[in-house]
Amino acid sequence: MSMLYLDNAATTPARPEVLEAMMPYLTRWYGNPSSHHTVGEAAADALADARARVARVLGLRNGDVVFTSGGTEANNLAVKGIALAAAQRRSDRHVHVVTTPIEHESVLESVDYLERVHGYAATRVPVDEHARVSTDAVAAALRDDTALVSIGYANNEVGTVQDAAALAAVAREARVPLHLDAVQAAGWLPLSADELGYDAISLAGHKLGAPKGTGVLGVRSRIPLEPLLHGGGQERGRRSGTEDVAGAVGFATALELAEAERVEASARVSAIRDRFIAQVCERVPWARLTGDPEHRLAGTASFTFEGTSGEAVLLELERRGVVSSSGSACAAGSDEPSHVLVAMGIAPAVAQTAVRFTFPRWLNAPLDAVADAVEASVTAVR
């Protein structure tokens, strides 16, 4: 039986163009980019070119791009690195960070680490029933010792998109760096630092058609950053370790392709998404769309189906040839309800009925058969 994969927020397949671009640096030009010989220098040139290509998409300087092992490391480096560096400049060595309760675990756990281990203060600004955060609430949370605001550009579970430019304006007025977790936003939303005004941004390659284990933290050079990995001083001292040249080339290629396709793909997939949402809500009257109905990613449609079990619905869907998820892959297998949905005010029992459909950028046909499968699966479980 053929399967339709609708869990692209968890990961996407590596694109053929990306694998083709990477291959020379896994075979012929496999040298260490820190080595001073022909093979190493070829690798160093490829790394520098990949860095420049990523910087162009982000609207940053080449030196602002730090290659990482993925979005989790990029978020850890941004949250911990900026906060730890800020504390070193204060006589009391304590700082304050601002985030929201709906962030990815890599942000929330980093903030928790700063509180537990370093005694820093943190404010988690509440969100509304659509998972939107108020710029006024963020402004009210800022203090004289605030070192960082870290907010997801687009939520990984419900697809809600924040007003990044407005948040950046609030942070800039208070002279506080803004970090955007843009792991889910890349390929769907604008990423230019000039347009959005952020100081740091996290991206993950496997959401864009690059292999797992590739990522980037874009962080303006003027922002002090304490490294998490110490060693040979690679990445301008911000992330030591021999660079994954092939991974950097693959990431740059995937990011360029996604950015080139972004506007057209977003419009096309949004129309398919809206039709799918309307069909599900019509055929399953007790379905509830989660996330902001207007400010949402083109590729995300998430629902709760009260009176069911989300995991049971997923099994029924897979039996009918549709692969989807109940939320973040990082929380898969947990018995706890989604922290995102609970923070939105959804009852824990209802939150455990969640099902998320996330679409690829190349989707070009209606999902009528998937809507049929959703109706049949929810009916069977309920």
Image (tube, rainbow, N blue to C red):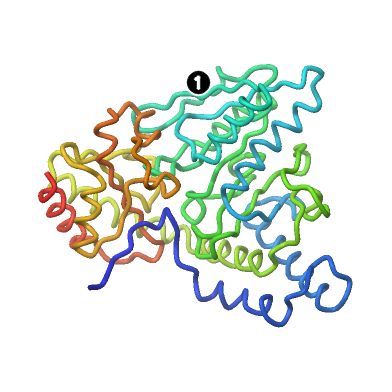
Residue at (28, 47) in percent of width and height:
355
Q: Which residue lies furthest to the bottom in this view?
A: 28
SS state under label 1: helix
From the top left corner, tell me how far across and down residue 256 is, in percent.
Answer: 58, 64
287 relative to 166, above or below: below
At horizontal 58% and vertical 59% (from top left) the residue drawn is: 213
Seen in the image, is 14 located left or right of residue 326?
right
Does residue 221 lie above or below 10 as drawn?
Answer: above
Horizontal and vertical percent position of residue 147 = 68, 27
The picture quadrant where one finds residue 347 is top left
Give the quadrant of residue 126: top left
Residue 333 horizontal side relative to residue 112, left or right: left
Q: Answer few, some or many: residues within 10 Å of disc 1's Cα (few below 14, many 20 plus, some between 14 and 19).
A: few
In which quadrant will I find the N terminus?
bottom left
Residue 346: x and y in percent read 29, 29
Q: Which amino acid does label 1 sit on?
A: Ala
Coordinates of residue 111 in the picture (x, y in percent): 59, 31
- The residue at the point 75 percent across, 37 percent down is 223
Considering depth in this image, is 86 or 337 the residue closer to the camera?
Answer: 337
Seen at 62% across and 74% down, the residue is: 22
From this view, report whether residue 284 is shown above or below residue 25: above
Position of the C terminus by quadrant? top left
The residue beneath circle 1 is 137
